[in-house]
Every structure is written in C-alpha cells, then in structure tokens.
Amino acid sequence: MSWDLAIATALLFVSATLLAVVGAIAWRYRSAPSAKTTAVVVWLGCVWSLGYAGELISTDLALKLSFAKFQYVAIASIPATWLMLVLQYTERERWIVPWKAGLLGVVPLLTVLLVWTTESHGLVWRTMTLDLRGSFPILAITYGPWFWLHVVYSYLLFVTGMLILVSELQGASRLSREHIAALLVSSLAPIAANVLYLAGLTPVPHLDLTPYAFLVSGVALLWGLFHSQFLDLVPVARDRVVESMTDGFLVLSRNNRVVDINAAAVKVLGKPQSEVLGQPLASVLDISLALPGELGNGVHPSSEVTLGSGEAQQVYETHVSPLTDSKGRLRGHVVLLSDITEKKHTQLALEDTIKRKDIAYQQALIYSNALNQEIRARNSAEEALRALSNKLAELQETERRHLARELHDEIGQALTGLRFVLESGREHGPNKIEEGLTIINDLIQQVHDLSLDLRPTVLDDLGLLPALAWYIERYSSQRSIKVNFKHRGLDRRFPPAIETAVYRIVQEGLTNISKYANVTTADVSIWTTNSTLEVQIEDSGVGFDVAKALTPPNSSGLVGMKERVALVGGVFTIDSAPMEGTRLFALLPLTQTGKEPQRDDLHSRRR
C-alpha cells in the first residue's frame, strides 16, 4: 500500500471515529427533540466515511463497486435527515407530519434502489472503470440522469435548511448565533467538498472529498456540544421577546446549566454574559432553587432572593417553570427574576406600622388595666372608708351611750339628790345645806372625771408622757391593778394624732385588762426608733380566742384600737390564746413614708 493511500484511508478512519463519538455524545441527550436526529445524521456520515475507506483500499472493480453502493445508504439519506434536524431545532416540527416525511424519503429510497441495479439501466452510473494513473487505483464513474436529479434534490434540501437557520440569526442571542454557526459549518463543509468533487476540481482525479470534509463537520458539532450545549438550547425564535423583557430571564438545561440569559438578568447578576453562559446555576446565582419536574422533588416555583448589600441591596421574586417542547417533553427550566424591592419596602413599612400599632395597643391595654386596678383600688378604699365611717359612727354612738349613762346614773342621780336636799333644807336648816354642799362637790368631781375620760387636758398641755403617767397612776388607784410602765424616748412632743392614738390604745388596753384578764398586774412598754413609735401592752391573764374576739359584737374595743392605728398609717397585732395571757402591739410611723411596715419586722421589734 502506498503512502498516499495510507494517508487517505487514515483520514477517513479518523473522520469516521470522530463522527461516531459525536453521535454517541448526542445520543446521551436523546430526550431532547433534536438529539436523536443529530446522532443519526453524524452516524450516516460515519457510514459514508467507512464505506469510502473500503472503496479506496479495494483492489478490484467489483469490490470497489460494492463499497460504493453501500455508501449510498448514507449519501441518499443525509440531506433529508439533516433538514429534519433543522426543523426540530427551530421547533418547526409541525412541518414534519408523516406524509411529508414519507415524501422526503421517496427520492432517497429510489436512489438507493437504482444504485444497486444501475448495471441494468445506467440511470445512476453509466460507466464504472478503474483509474490507474495515480499511486493507487480509483473508481472512475460517469453519472446518469437520476444521479443529477438526486444531486439537485439533495442540494435543495440543504439550501432550505440553511435558509431556515440564517433566518433565525436576526434578533438571536450570542449563544443562539453560536449554535446556528456550528450547524451551518457542519453542513457547508461537506457541501463545498462535494461541489469540488462533482466539478472535477479535486487534487487527485475522481477522489471524493466529501467524506474528508466530515472532519470539519465533526469538529464544529463537537464544539457546539461542549462549548455552547446547543442540544440544551431553547428555540432561538423567542429571543426578540426575551430581550425586551424587564424581568431577568435565565434558561437552564436539563443538567441545571445556564444556556441563555437576557440583558435584564445580566444587569441583575452584575456579570458579563460570557461568564454566565454554560455555567451551573449555583455558580452564578447564590441561591438554592427547588426546580419543578426532574430537577426537584418538591415543587416550589416561587421564592425570594436578596442580592447586593447596603443601599444597593435588591429583593427579587423568582419563578421557576419547566420548559417543554411541542410534544410536552422536558427540555429544561426557565427562571424569572422580578424586582420586588419597592414592594418589599412597602410591606416592611406596613409591618412596622402594624407592629407599632400593636405596641401602642398593648400599652393602652396595660394602661387600661392599671386604670381599672386603680379604680378598683379606689372603690375598695371608698368601701373601706365607708366602713370606717360607719365604725366611727358606731363608736361615737357607743361613747354617747356611755356618756348618757354616766350623766344619767351618776350626775343625774346626784342632781336629783341635791334637789331633795335643797327642798328638805327649807324644813331642817343648816344640816341639809352641808349635805347639799357635799353632793355638789361630788358632782363637780364626777364632771371632772368624766371630762378627763373624754379628753384629758394634760395630753394637750403637757404631752404624751405626762398624760400616760397620770392616767396609769389614776388607773392603778381606781382598779387595784399594778401597771409596770416602761418607756424610752417619750420626753418630747409627737404629732397630735400619734399622741391621741397612743393614749387611747393604752386606755382601751388597760380597760380590757381590768374587765376580762382577771389579773393584778399589767405591763405597758412604749419606745421610739428613728422613724417609729411602738407600744406593747401585756398581761398574764385568762387570754382569749383572737378570731372570735374580733368578730362583732365581741370585739371588746380591739377593732377600734386596730382601726385607730390604721388611721395614722401603723400596724396593730394581737397575740393571745386561752389561759396564755395577751400581748397587744402597735407600731406607728413618725414620718409619712408611704410604706407599711412588714409583719416580720414587727415581731423582731416586740419586747
């Protein structure tokens, strides 16, 4: 075998291998509408290249003719198949109805039949000889009328397909133009080589350059597959609409790569179009989208994404939709980016307003509750004040009854006796006058005692300590009960209300002891601190049940003492039990702090 023949056949095998690889790659995308047709076209080119290689290395005429006839399976089929590829790529599949496809295949089928029977009629090949002028024998053929009919028909199909592709260039994106260029180059190269062969302009006479041109076709298609992913491209006819959209528009392939993008999306992403096309979505848009269809289990077609930072930050709403062809087959996905920044700002402002109103409402509710509590507290205070007023009125009535009884029993009787004495004095003379004077003196003393019981003048004139000392001395002499009086810090004047309260507590406490305790001694202790005056009255008498004693009408003056202490802001406690004696304790504030003393503190201060 000569070196020329070896090189010629080696190039054909390289061309066949390249086309086989391109066809296999295209077949991987067979779910795409034009992928299967692309694979068929390049595999037919592979058959042509292999058949021509067999023709060149054959040495006798019969074997060369067999390989030449074998090639016509591809030669006759490639033009119609290529046109179908163009129609599918540009989504003109509606043109490929069964009867039209059948018409396209009539001429190729007849051509194959006539080639295999050409010896009997000469319609395709008139003469077939070996040309031995070169370094290796080449089949020399003169063609018949059907061959030229077949050539015209094939060229017509190629030209139609190329015109369709050229018409799509206007308004197409850069990526779409690259895809169309790959298809045009892959078809123009073998057509140009075929024209040179038919015109007899080849370097080697009768050497068909068409299979060699398939090397260019294979490289162009391979570039389109790997660089531009042309089998993933959506139809180029939509570019005019897409480029005019104000929303960002991205087209994703089935493997989630960006295969198309409009100007609005380029502006949103802030990246050149060349850096986006062909890249995975995650590398150009820092979001995670759950794509409907095959690229996502869950369907979440809408979401929000924030791009940028600071004042340049923008919020976009994303809409993801499946992209299908006219037969409903999934080809990829479309992602729309709608600017909702102003809408988001309005929504946030509205939410902030609602939040502020809610806070104001909560504050108003708190204020209303506080106001209601204050009203209830005031109502309770008014009720307590009314109860206290009633109690004071009751105490006043009690005092009036006591005073009336004293006036009736003591002074009234004394005055009646005085009247009798004076009337009898008319008859008995001076003796009765002396008796009347005695009665008058007793009456004066009773009025004096009654006045002291109502309000001793020594309390107003000299103060608390002298008043208590006088009262205790008088009490002890009248009731035969010894009172141990201890005091500290009483050698000064106190507010009148405090002095009156302490005097009445001691007076009422000692009165109760004389009535109920059944004792001969009692203890009264009074002392002061920086801010309080404290009173403690004790006896070791019979004691009583405190709860029962405080229940009307058995209060024995205890309730009056407790309320008298409360009026000056103090606290009054009673410790007693049957047969265990009694202790009364009162703590009265000397300064108005507004804070009631705690009971724990009271117990710690008792002496």
Image (cartoon, grey):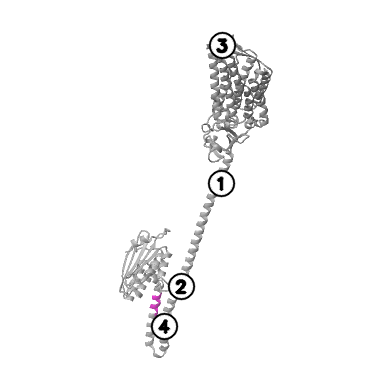
Q: Position of residue 484 (x, y in %)?
A: 30, 69
Rounded to the nearest angstrom, the CA distance separating label 2 from label 1 is: 60 Å
In primary-sequence order, the first of circles 3 and 2 is 3
In the picture, the disc for residue 413 is 4
In primary-sequence order, the first of circles 2 and 1 is 1
Residue tagged by mark 3? 136
In the picture, the disc for residue 353 is 1
The amino acid pointed to by label 3 is: Phe
As drawn, the residue found furthest toward the front would be: 120
Q: Indicate yes or no whether the magenta region holds residue 444.
A: yes
Camera-nearest label, 2 or 1: 1
Q: Give the range drawn in magenta.
A: 443-450
Q: Is residue 76 left or right of residue 431?
A: right
The amino acid pointed to by label 1 is: Thr
Q: Where is residue 303 in the image (x, y as percent from the top left)?
A: 55, 40
Residue at disc 3, secondary structure: loop
- Asked whether the beta carbons under mark 3 and mark 2 sit within 8 Å of each other, the answer is no
Residue tagged by mark 2? 394
